[in-house]
Amino acid sequence: MALLVCCLFALIVKNIVCSGDNELYKYVNQTDPATEQLVEFAKEHPRSLENLPDDVAQEISARDPDYYNRDLYNAIENQNYPAWELEMDVLTFENIKNINYNKFDVTRLWKKDTYIRMKIPIGILTTSAGRPVEIRESITLNSDGFSNPYHIDLLTHADAERTPERIVHAKGTAAIGYFIVTHDVSKYTKADVFNGIGKKTPVVGRFSTIAQNKGGTDLERATKALAAKFFTSEGNLDLLMINLPIFLHKDPLVFTHAAHAIKRNPKTNLYDLTTRWDFVTRVADTFHTFMWLFSDFGIPNGYRKMDIFPIHTYEINNKHGDRYFVRFNFRTEQGLENLPDDVAQDISVRDPDYFTRDLYDAIENKNYPAWELEMDILTLEEIKHLDYNPFDVIRLWKRGTYHTVKVGRLIFNKNPDNVFRVAELSAFNPGNLVPGIPGPIDTLFRSRRSSYREAQVYRLGVNHNREDVNVPLHWNVYDRNGVPPVRDNMKDVPNYYPNSFHGPTPYVDPSRPKERLSVLQANVVDLEPINYFFNHVLDCEQRQRLINNTIPSLIPISPKLRRRVVRLFTLTDPTMGKKLTEGLERALKMPQTPPPPVLKV
């Protein structure tokens, strides 16, 4: 491989002449032999540069003088392959004349802004089958373009380069990072990812907004999300999270109807406030989420400055088989910030990709976004004495009924080299769990683990878990064949179980709980959690802003539907209904906004 890389590089450069022992080289470009430049080679680690302070280094040295060797060996053994990116710092001979320092002095750095940093050319352009493309094949004018293999190769691939758009959360971006354990939670779970202070686990994350198509605005008053894939030694752990601590509905049958109601109207192809409010008043379970969205929490100031929640109550267990029930909360370390309507609208006009740009720029500038993971915990005995259902995804746990412990930090420190490869080929499933986290027991979760898998098979094919961005650290399966990628297709391992040969075998987990709770969920509308949110989570000023934010969405809808919305507010809290009625009456009396002035040509 090293010889191949050198040969390809030589084809591009043709001539690299060493300038003595000072590691400065003359570079002659084959496509422009008249251009000569001096270059220094810089090798940069694509992950993050890390150094140790004296006290930490001395402590490690006392425990493990072979720390460097062991770290390198273990990384490669665990398929966490170290890599460096080769770059060139370039000076033209013309620039050299105007530099007031000795660029050949190996004991000093080149001064910033006197050189250009560029990546090494990767090689000769080829077709997808590897055939080199001759320069005259890079254009088709005045030639037989349909005899040009490069033209046909490029054109036919472009016709099929889009994967189906996600039903919800279509617009998204991605980041790469890690999770580090900061506190001992072995009392509660044996999951390897959360055990061992200082342990780091690679993570891929996809940030998104729920209703927008690709190309839409990030700043809609709508749910935002982070789907995170933790590459643990025990398999992939997927946590699918939103920026609200409650979900839109608890009945899985509602999902399809809710998705249709918040997406585009099939007749007008426009987002429709009538369909949204009609659905909320017909399926009042969804009202709680809409109250959060119309509150100050509705538009976070970018992905970095929002808390994120996996919504379900997860069952976890320790190595002794003791069970606990937890809600995970990822608290932003950037400070929780939200945007008022007028500011969000102003930003959306100028930069509809504001959330995406903010995340990318922060990581590029090494201002790495981070979240602290906490667990709200209930024991099985505590659950028996609660006056509410802790497995209900559309309500908050009541304060004072649980205790909270810290677990670790989620940090994103690298932007993808190719966003499509990560954001669009990533496949998340809440059913991807690991030993020590048996997972949620509610009906919605059981449905989601099935529907998410079906969605990924539709979008990416049955082998979606073998895409580079999804493949776990270790996998031994009896799955075979199918549409690529199949990777090594398990080589010569038997494709049936049980077998008498060398096929993979299941293991025995003596700590796995022998029984699971079965929860019956009430099929009635409970407005108490919404009343609690309005009166105990929000202060007086926040309650008024919720009303003010709601009113503009009610102006375009019919009077009959408007009355249904007001009635729902009033049933939830009479004061809230009264404030909404008064605000609506004032708004409806105001003159309509005139059409904007236009330029007639």
Image (tube, grey):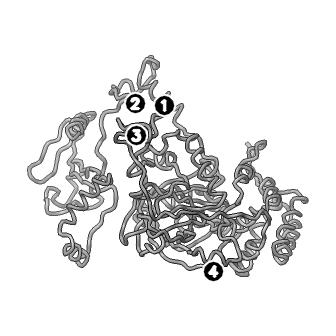
Q: Are marks 1 and 2 in contact (CB under 8 Å)?
A: yes
Q: Are marks 2 and 4 in contact (CB under 8 Å)?
A: no
Q: Are marks 4 and 1 in contact (CB under 8 Å)?
A: no
Q: Report crowding for label 2: few under 14, some 14 to 19, many 20 or more residues within 10 A (C-alpha).
A: few
Q: Which residue is mark 2?
A: 128
| Quadrant (top left/top right/bottom left/bottom right) for the C terminus | top right
- What's under tag 1, amino acid-wise? His
The local secondary structure at tag 4 comes to: loop
User: Which disc number belongs to residue 157?
Assistant: 1
Q: Earlier in the sequence, mark 1 or mark 2?
A: 2
The local secondary structure at tag 1 comes to: helix
Q: Does residue 62 appear in this view? A: yes
| 282 sits left or right of 340 in the view | right
Q: Is residue 590 above or below residue 158?
A: below
- What's under tag 3, amino acid-wise? Asn
Query: Mark 3 or mark 2: which is in front?
Result: 3
Which residue ends up furthest to the front in the rendered image? Answer: 500
Separation of marks 4 and 1 at Cα, in angstroms? 57 Å
Q: Earlier in the sequence, mark 4 or mark 3?
A: 4
Separation of marks 3 and 1 at Cα, in angstroms? 42 Å
User: Which disc number belongs to residue 401?
Assistant: 4
Q: In the rendered image, which quarter is residue 572 located in?
A: bottom right
| 412 sits left or right of 261 in the view | left
Q: Which residue is mark 3?
A: 499
The local secondary structure at tag 2 comes to: loop
